[in-house]
Amino acid sequence: MTDRNDENRISFSLGEAIFTEGEPGNKTMYLIEKGRVEVLKGDAVVARLGAGEPIGEMSLLLDEPRSATVRALNSVEALEITGENFGEILTKRPGIGRTIMKALAQRLKVTTKALSEAQAKLKEKS
């Protein structure tokens, strides 16, 4: 059961879908403060994330539907960041901006490596 408080904090219960692939993103992301989540593309688990990691940042930055499903693996507490409070949160806590950029860079690095390896395998087969 989702629980909200007055400081942009939100809690999710074990097994709860934080968001579902394809649904509107509503320019909202979360910074996990406690707990772990799994990220699913279709039925495949593509990542497990925990404290200090952002989820849903593509929706906030690109205003597009959710690209994956994220489900709580245990009790999760997160900071909710929306298009409306993003600037204010970055002003009050500039480290959050660095955290988001670092996560995006790391995810791009992993994706680029996977793409390169897949291209190499295709070349070997042809």
Image (cartoon, helix red, strand yellow):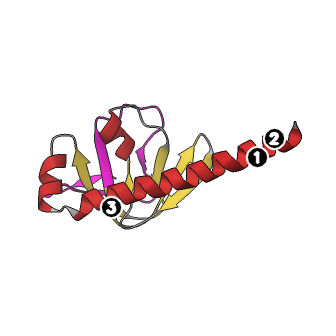
Residue 34 against residue 125 in the figure, above or below: below
Residue 59 against residue 54 in the figure, above or below: above
Q: Judge whether residue 15 can be spotted in this image.
A: no
> Any mark on residue 123, and which?
2
What's the distance in space between the residues labelled 1 and 2, CA to CA? 5 Å
Q: Nearer the viewer, residue 74 or 82?
A: 82
> Any mark on residue 120, and which?
1
Determine contact: label 1, label 2, CB under 8 Å. yes
The residue under the point 46% across, 49% down is 70
The residue under the point 38% across, 59% down is 102
Q: Secondary structure at mark 2?
A: helix
What's the distance in space between the residues labelled 1 and 3, CA to CA? 32 Å
Q: Is residue 87 left or right of residue 108?
A: left
Q: Which residue is mark 3?
A: 99
Q: As shown in the figure, which amino acid type bears the numbered disc 1?
A: Ala
Within 10 Å of disc 3 (Cα), the crowding (few <14, some 14-19, many 20+) is some
What's the distance in space between the residues labelled 2 and 3, CA to CA? 36 Å
| Magenta segment main secondary structure | loop
Q: Is residue 35 left or right of residue 47?
A: left
The residue under the point 35% across, 55% down is 101
**Residue 105 among those drawn in magenta:** no
Residues rendered magenta in the picture: 1-30
Q: As shown in the figure, which amino acid type bears the numbered disc 3?
A: Thr
> Any mark on residue 111, and which?
none
Q: Judge whether residue 7 can be spotted in this image.
A: yes
